[in-house]
Amino acid sequence: MKKAKIHVMLKEGVLDPQGKAAHKSLESLGYKGIEGVRIGKYIEVTLADDADGDRDKLVREMCQRLLSNPVIENYEIEWEK
Amino acid sequence: MKKAKIHVMLKEGVLDPQGKAAHKSLESLGYKGIEGVRIGKYIEVTLADDADGDRDKLVREMCQRLLSNPVIENYEIEWEK
Amino acid sequence: MNKEITKEVIAEHGLSESEYEMILSILGREPNFTELGIFSVMWSEHCSYKSSRKHLGTLPTKAPYVVHGPGENAGVVDIGDGFVAVFKMESHNHPSFIEPYEGAATGVGGILRDVFTMGARPVALLDSLRFGSPEHPRTKYLVDGVVSGISGYGNCVGVPTVGGEMFFNGSYDGNILVNVFCLGIAKKDKIFTGICEGVGNPVIYVGSKTGRDGIHGATMASGEFDEKSEEKRPTVQVGDPFTEKLLIEACLEAMKSDAILGIQDMGAAGLTSSSCEMAGRGGTGIEMNIDDIPRREEGMTAYELLLSESQERMLIVAKRGREEELINIYKKWGLEGVVVGKVTGDGLFRIVEKGETVVEIPVADISNKAPIYDRPSKRPAYLDALQNFDTDKVAEPKDYNQTLLKLIGSLNLGSKEWVYQQYDHTIRTDTVTLPGSDASVIRVKGTKKGIAITSDCNPRLCYLDPYMGGAMAVAEAARNIACSGGKPMAITDNLNFGNPEKPEVMWQMKEAIRGISDACVALGTPVVSGNVSLYNETNGIGIYPTPTIGAIGVVEDIKKCVTQYIKGEGELLFLIGSNKKSLAGSEYLSLIHGLEKGTISPLDLDTEKRLQTALLAAIDKEIIRSAHDCSEGGLAITIAESCMSGDKTFGAEVSIEDDGRIDNILFGEGQSRIIVSILDKDRNILEELFLANGIETSYLGKTGGVNLSIRVNNNQTISCPIEQIKKAWAEAIPSYMA
Amino acid sequence: MKFGIVVFPGSNCDHDCYHAVKHVLGQEAAFIWHANPDLNGCDALIVPGGFSYGDYLRAGAMAAISPALTEIKAFVKRGNPVIGICNGFQILLESGILPGAMIRNKDLRFICKDTFLRVENNNSKFTNKFNDKKLISLPIAHAEGSYYADAEELKRLEGEGRVLFRYADKEGNVSNDTNPNGSLLNIAGILNKEGNALGMMPHPERSMESIVGNEDGRLIFESMIEAVS
Ligand SMILES: Nc1ncnc2c1ncn2[C@@H]1O[C@H](COP(=O)(O)OP(=O)(O)O)[C@@H](O)[C@H]1O
Ligand SMILES: [Mg+2]
């Protein structure tokens, strides 16, 4: 549990102008059969070897306090094996 | 092979001002043992069921042409199972 | 690093055999690899101006109000009331072509540092942009990236971008131009220079850590493009405007102490050129310990640290004993400050790594013995054929309404609002004249004054006649300043050309410089700073010669500022000036007929000077309601712009008596022409004032109604709803970019 | 009266706000440094625009967790007026002083232009000087100004008269065409429940002097002065 890989995505129902724009651009480049594009953030937090405590809880807290905005975003944490 | 999950990250050695600022900010919240924070993009491209051809090649091309900036970024594609 | 110095290594560093011989004689020994790298960047075209220096020396640089001319980081001009204007223009052409967002963004960062390093607060930016033809597959992507990059950086640091230029032409398909101008304001007695003085004084490094960004960046900017340039891609730097903003505030705060003796940004060739230039100016030496340089990555060599072009870094020479105080100011702003060396008296640039000297080069020789070339020049053979083209041979259009709409709806003549709306142009609350007029005006808080700024150059005219084109760029810039109510004071030049090793390109540059020189002398606007960008050439195809001129002028009373758009119905429209023009080099001939040929209508500098003097006198009398320079697109386009570029749109009834071709009357281009609008009661004052200065005035008509109607020799030639014209004009760029 | 102007690293409208209240309106003004915020003696606060912490991650996110915000929250709790402008609005949202969030402008680009604003409530601490003026013009300059809140929250804001400004046209009509950034319900400015914290995207401090635009912005600061006295 050294590197936390965090995905932050806009909640369902919140307009994703970036995803929409990318979708449109891809279509104008000639890519047809695309159903949807969504764009979010990918954050890697690497912890020091000697950081102690419950690492998952720690990173979850970072997400809640800073890395995501619960009004508009969801996040998911995965740990690099 | 319906939903491509794409991670776009700055290349090794390219300045990541966002990650740097988030790192500092987390430290000021009192989180000590953080070695590094890197921030990139996470993109989901969902293809229509009837989109044909080599899907992986297709999405790779999209990454090269639009979704990533090959000059300073690398990308990785994973398919949702 | 002890890589062997072979012929290949020398060639890779862009050094010629004779240049290498010179290095051997300077050092009295073989250089090591790091030293070779240092000579390579310091003697690159970009840093040494080796092809242009000889000719730059002919530019006029003096006036009683010039405080610092070329040679400093930026030019400094006294504007009275205890204030100076500090300004310069710089190119970031090659990096912007490779990575438009970061290239343009770091271009903004670099020119800002040139200005605040002099102790001035940056107060305004202009961006002068040239792109390839609209049909070229990369053009849209480049426009989008460059504009976002300028917007992303400039907006974040909080400096308004208040104007610029945008021109599309096939000659830029493989080499776009991104020239950025920055204006700063400082107290006259608080100017700083990049000088290294006082043996034993500490040298302090502040700002971002050094990474492997843009190593060889300077060499890249001086090498012609070819297919292989793709491989040089990782040399692009990434900007961090947030750090730049902190650096501005920290530097301006640190400068309030009297602890700083000299300060300079690390631009092209980074630590090497900043330290060598500072020592060069002070006639001193400098010694730095490479182990102390803050770095972003492990395992960086002295070579990399010395040549890196990481952004947002500065070098300071401080008074001995005051270093802690300075470092604490930077710390307060969240920035690193580290003592990395000291000023020495031995005139050497010395780098120490782990206690061992790894570089030792005489500072004076790096700059004084830098090669200067008097490259051969030759008038291009194709010019005769181009100039001899008879523009009377082209067919006249049948429908002038359609022609007008097509022209005004083109990318070159269409509204640039799409661009400047992405730039914060009202921050700092000093933008008296917003973008969308001939020149923008920035208020100087605490005075009644304003500073008018503009950037101009018509590359097509420079291509057809580089001497005239160069002079015209200066004249147009000064004219735009005058139209806004400012007295032209001084200019900065950004000379963009192709490969100087070609005699034809050299000739273009020499001629353009000669034209700039003559115009600056005649108009009383010395050159106080500048930049040269050569090798703008891909696979042997060079850009049109593009000597971009950035100009400033002083508006004595900002209440008297004039804008280009009509203010109400019933204003009288006048054409001021001799009305000499030609189709040669016009936007009309290029867009409608696909021709860029002919002998352009010449500029008469004496007439130009009298025109501007008279205009400023009329503005001072407050009789001018609007003034608009008649440039690209000619008379009809200029009148249309006057009618629709303000908040409100007005029609106009215009009648012209003139001989010659109708398309030339409406769309022909010439110098020293201005469209003004006035109130009926001021007609006599206007006519007498210009007559007294030997300048013609012709009454054109009145504003009002919903149509733009133009009669030529009593024939209705144009009659079109002004809203329709405005729509074509406003939608040109948005619909292209959509 | 004394205005405190909070300065974060990356704030860049701080000097403009200072000029507005100090030199144009002749009030006392002081910069409040984010790291050691001393609000003693301040009657009102301005959280100015800019790019605090570079706007990296999310606009306003890092400023919202800085020590200054603890003080600002307490200041709001005590009932004192606080105005967050542009980035300041984003900070008030991120810190939870105001409800909702900002997302990127609908066309993703930064927009700098004059906008007309319909004044929806002339009775607040920030609009009491408007009398019957229902329409003002102020410039916007932002890339993330598209206001978002869930349906319930929007209903509450509307019901409690807490939507203060809406993007309109020069006749005061509010429609999709007059929405520059995709903001829900054309929202340009909102109040907290207690009515003493305002967040707005347009820049009143840029409309203080007719030589550089108009003077509509004065009304907002003058209303704050009125509310305090
Ligand atoms: N790249 C740009 N960035 C900002 N403003 C621009 C840009 N290009 C043009 N403008 C503005 O648009 C207006 C029209 O430009 P232009 O036609 O070049 O003016 P002129 O012919 O009077 O020099 C000017 O106010 C200019 O400052
Ligand atoms: Mg021009």
Image (cartoon, coloured by chain):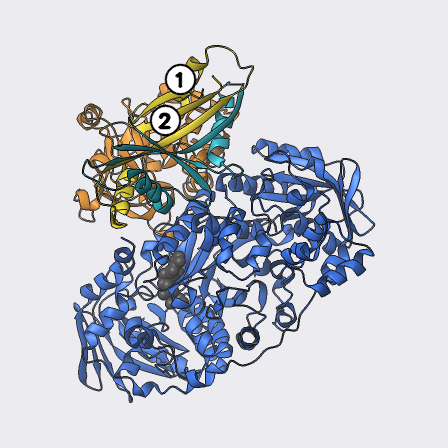
Chain colours: A yellow, B cyan, C blue, D orange
Residue in front for this viewpoint, D66 or C690: D66
Q: Nearer the viewer, mark 2 or mark 1?
A: 2
Q: Quadrant of ligand 1?
A: bottom left
Q: CA distance from mark 2 to mark 1?
A: 12 Å
Position of C462 relative to C316 (above/below) = below
Q: Amino acid at mark 1?
A: Arg
**Label 2 residue SS:** strand
> Residue at the top extreme?
A53
Q: Disc 1 marks which residue? A: A60
Q: How many marks?
A: 2
Q: Is residue C118 left or right of residue D174?
A: right
Q: Disc 2 marks which residue? A: A7
| Pointer 2 with pointer 1, Cβ within 8 A | no
Residue C610 in sight in this render? yes
Q: Is residue C705 left or right of residue C351?
A: left
Residue in front for this viewpoint, C188 or C601: C601
Q: Quadrant of the N terminus of chain C?
A: top right
Position of C274 relative to B27 (above/below) = below
Residue at figure coordinates x 56%, y 32% from the top left: C334
Residue in front for this viewpoint, D6 or D183: D183
Q: Position of residue D41 (x, y in %)?
A: 47, 25
Q: Assess disc 2: are there few (<14), some (14-19) or many (≥20) residues with their C-alpha within 10 Å of its C-alpha.
A: many
Q: Chain of mark 2?
A: A
**Label 1 residue SS:** helix
